[in-house]
Image (cartoon, coloured by chain):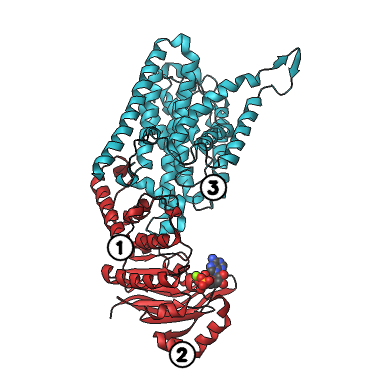
Chain colours: A cyan, B red
Amino acid sequence: MNKLNFKEKTNINLLMYLAIIVVSVTILIFLDMNKFQYNYVISIIEKSLVYAVVALSMNIVTGFTGLFSLGQAGFMALGAYTTAILTIPIASRPNVYYMNGILPALENAIVPIPVALILGGVVAGVFAALIGIPILRLKSDYLAIATLGFSEIIRAVIASPMMDKITNGSYGLKSIPGFKSSLECFAYSLICIVIMILIINSSTGRDFKAVREDEIAARAVGINLFKTKELSFVVSSFFTGIGGGLLAMFMRSIDSKTFQITLTYDILLIVVLGGIGSITGSIVGAFFVTAGKELLRFFDEPLIIGGVQIPLFKPGFRMVIFSILLMIVVLFFRKGLLGGKELSFNKLMKVRRKKNLDEPGGNA
Amino acid sequence: MENVLRLTDMSIAFGGLMALDGLNLEVNKGEIVAIIGPNGAGKTTAFNCITGIYTPTSGNIEYLGESIINKEPSDITKKGIARTFQNIRLFKELSVFENVLIAMHLRYNDNIFTSTFRLNKKMEDEMREETKKLLDSQDLYKYRNDVAGSLPYGIQRRLEIARALATSPTLLLLDEPAAGMNPQETMELTSYIKKIRDEFGLTVLLIEHHMDLVMDISERIYVIDFGKLIAKGTAEEVQNNPKVIEAYLGVQDDA
Ligand SMILES: Nc1ncnc2c1ncn2[C@@H]1O[C@H](COP(=O)(O)OP(=O)(O)OP(=O)(O)O)[C@@H](O)[C@H]1O
Ligand SMILES: [Mg+2]
């Protein structure tokens, strides 16, 4: 009886998610077929998907493990540069590195895109593992500062003349192969998101949550605090790195300025707005913020009413609006719009029958 | 009688304060032993040293004949020492079921790959089954979907004990398990502790503030005051010890 109900519940959720995927794919195919007409919409969707990956990976470490890390831009840079360096067509390389030339070892190093993305994740993960050893022993507040610093160091190193033959220094990289269609972007993002959801709902994810809830109690039930934090940080950075690679593919050209603190701020905005510790919050938040920023673009244009130019309407104003929005959310919905909860079809459709009939932990 | 826990000359200082000063204590298999003493005596500090949260400044801690000083708290738990906390520490925003389930992890060897791709399904099912059984036996199954932090205080205390039991301990440390309970609840708790001791084959070391509470339950009592052991023995011996009476008279107000 119990089991039946539990199965039923999972199946309904699963079916609904499958339905969403099918609908999304259909829409994307339609948009792809009318590419010229919907270019703008497609680019918003692709960017949202990439941001959803990065936001969810930030949520793993911040929302589910309780470690406030602000290194997103740095890890994205690592993933983005790795992906770019390994995928720019060999023929285009002399053109890209026209100023300083390219490191001979990299001249012919090219791998398929999925491999490059994974390697980007690995590079980010390895860096996370290394810096995690000293900084994860710090108290949470210091962690934020240390990761922020790390992010800026990575950016400085990438832009430094020392790295000219690898990163092309301050000139950045271009001719990065983009997504062949929005479906390709969707597929990569979906795979990342699904794996992250599986992690969050696994026994490993439960250890993360235990650490978030109470470090001392977690240790008292046999959880190794440092190993668990390190694991969460590495996993999160791995997916952030992949997200960076996807961003490189989306933008087709990157330089160190792409990965400024404002990028981390964008991701943070999504995570906080969507709800710290909410998977669906991060995903919905990514679309909401990315589309919202585009819609608010007219605030950046000079506005003239009756011959008078309204002084506030100038470039940067929409960021002010977004910041105000963020403050409102933090003040009134302390835990974000979804407040650590998940959007679930069971709740929406109220198919949940008697509470005591469903099996616990049905989301695993 | 097999020795389970032995503290030898254990001391710990915080800055200038000697929170524990040369503590000697022994617990044998199957015993229920109590530590009592006024506020700030160093009782909780002793627990924190045993479970590895603090490292003693000097002295030794042996568990089943092996020194456990400088060990990671999680490793100490894996060796078989579980505890509860004076100010209940549950995973507040997780469900009752998850609270216990998480404590089952240490006995199962899965890693991020097996757990992510559900290759550990058999283990996971087993853990869930065991959690269900344990909650059932502790009369907590009906709360399984409730958020731990939302439960009444008494239930939270019981859940914390259940979570400790989930780690399959040999030695259970209870820090003021009766705090905040009325006399009726305290009596129930007394028989409950005896019951789980027998059922799970436990050895129990517990901290209690109030002497009369532990009289009934503990075979032996250690009395600490200002970090020093001032008396030990059976309930009766301790009760009539002038040093103990003095220590307690001094703090009668908050006892
Ligand atoms: N981490 C710490 N840093 C500094 N001092 C501490 C620390 N932990 C405990 N102490 C001090 O050690 C002394 C003993 O504290 P402890 O909590 O062990 O007392 P207790 O016997 O458990 O008291 P209570 O009955 O109030 O729980 C107190 O003076 C306390 O302030
Ligand atoms: Mg105490």
Q: Between residue B161 and residue A319, name the one nearer to us.
A: B161
Chain at tag 3: A
**Label pair 2/1, CB-CB below 8 angstroms:** no
The residue pinned by badge 3 equals A143
The residue pinned by badge 2 equals B240
Looking at the image, which residue is at 56% across and 80% down? B252
Q: Could you say where residue A67 lies in the image, as x and y percent from the top left?
A: 49, 47
| Kind of residue at badge 1 | Ser
Q: Between residue A59 and residue A155, name the one nearer to us.
A: A59
A45 to the left or right of A346: right
Q: What element does badge 1 sit on?
A: loop
Q: Between residue A62 and residue A111, name the one nearer to us.
A: A62
Q: What element does badge 2 sit on?
A: loop
A324 to the left or right of A89: right
Q: Is residue B163 above or below residue A268?
A: below
Looking at the image, which residue is at 58% across and 82% down? B250
The residue pinned by badge 1 equals B168
Ligand 1 within 8 Å of disc 2? The answer is no
Looking at the image, which residue is at 57% across and 24% down? A293
Q: Are both tags, 2 and 1, on one chain?
A: yes
Q: Could you say where residue A101 lies in the image, as x and y percent from the top left?
A: 50, 23
